Amino acid sequence: MDPTIAINERVDVVTVFHKQGDISSLCLPAKMRWRGREIALTEMALRFPTEAGKRMIHVFHVSDGINGYRLEFDAEALTWTLVSLISGEDHA
């Protein structure tokens, strides 16, 4: 069974930009506000650019230490979307 929960909602994101480092650490989402909750993003697993038509989308797979999130930044529209969530809580 796939543990991924589709969300597809725009969110507010606080992003940290570093002046030095490799491409994977120059731009990091630090926290997001989703459905009235502020979530600190403490771990980044993966970042990669992709295209949606002519739009450049930057995909970030991040975690708050419990749950995993797929965030997408649309570089043309300057918007963040929480695409999906993988719950790390035990639902047994």
Image (cartoon, rainbow, N blue to C red):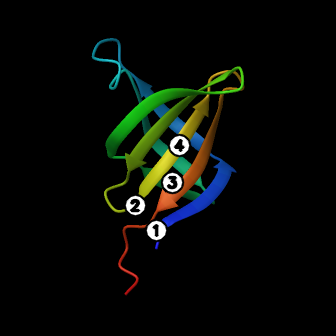
Give the mark nearer the N terminus: 3 vs 2: 3
Residue designated by label 1 = 3
Disc marking residue 42: none
Q: Residues within 10 Å of mark 4 (few under 14, many from 20)?
A: many
Name, please, the residue furthest toward the bottom. Answer: 92
Q: How many marks?
A: 4
What's the CA distance linking mark 2 and mark 1? Answer: 11 Å
What's the CA distance linking mark 3 and mark 1? Answer: 22 Å
Name, please, the residue furthest toward the front. Answer: 1
Q: Residues within 10 Å of mark 1 (few under 14, many from 20)?
A: few
* Disc 3 element: strand
| Pair 4/3: label in front | 4
Residue designated by label 4 = 71
Residue drawn at the location 67% of the way across and 51% of the way down: 9
Residue type (three-letter) at the residue carrying disc 4: Leu
What's the CA distance linking mark 4 and mark 3? Answer: 15 Å
Q: Residues within 10 Å of mark 2 (few under 14, many from 20)?
A: few
What's the CA distance linking mark 4 and mark 1? Answer: 17 Å
Residue designated by label 2 = 67
Q: Position of residue 20 (x, y in %)?
A: 29, 12
Give the mark nearer the N terminus: 2 vs 1: 1
Disc marking residue 38: 3
What's the CA distance linking mark 3 and mark 2? Answer: 13 Å
Residue drawn at the location 27% of the way across and 16% of the way down: 21
Residue type (three-letter) at the residue carrying disc 2: Asn
